[in-house]
Image: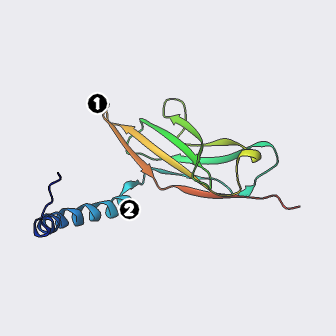
Amino acid sequence: MTRRTSRPARTARTAAALPALALACTVLVAAPAQAHKDWGHTRAPDGTLKRGCNYYPYRYVVDPPRDDWQIETFLVDPRGRRLGSGTFDSDSEANRGKARWRLCRASTSPGRFKIRMKVTWYEVDGEPHTGWVKPSYFRLRKPTR
């Protein structure tokens, strides 16, 4: 036999939970706007999705508060699938540079691509600080005949 809670008791519990729910929603809405750090950016030119597998260039600039850093770049296709990534650090790379993605037309659709960049920089004592910079976008069109 199941026990049923009376309607007034359920309503009172729901009413008590509403302020906490409203606060949680406010925090979730406000967080993405504050989530992007001003520690660098990425950029890629628009282009044409060529036949076969080809390299498509992009650039990165990283400007964290300290000179000891590491970045990770991620390419996301128009369907939201992750296609590739790259890793760079201050020990072997300059704070601005060029890189490239290798994409194959048979497995990639034309459209708007997103580049995300995660920056990690380190204090003198080695404590890490991590944040995401604002993503950049570029388009690869179908080839014209």
Sequence-first disc among 2 and 1: 2
68 and 56: which one is in front? 56
The residue to which callout 2 is attached is 33
Q: CA distance from mark 2 to mark 1?
A: 30 Å
Which residue is outermost to the right?
Answer: 145
User: Which residue shows up at 76% across the image and 43% down it?
Assistant: 54
Query: Residue 128 location in percent, x, y?
Result: 34, 36
Image position of 30 with respect to 57: above or below: below
Q: Quadrant of residue 107?
A: top right
Q: Secondary structure at mark 1?
A: loop
The residue to which callout 1 is attached is 125
Query: Residue 53 location in percent, x, y?
Result: 77, 41
Query: Residue 70 location in percent, x, y?
Result: 46, 36
Q: Is residue 40 left or right of residue 66?
A: right
The quarter of the image holding the C terminus is bottom right
Amino acid type for the residue under numbered disc 2:
Ala
Which residue is outermost to the front?
Answer: 1
Image position of 12 with respect to 85: above or below: below
Dot label at residue 134: none
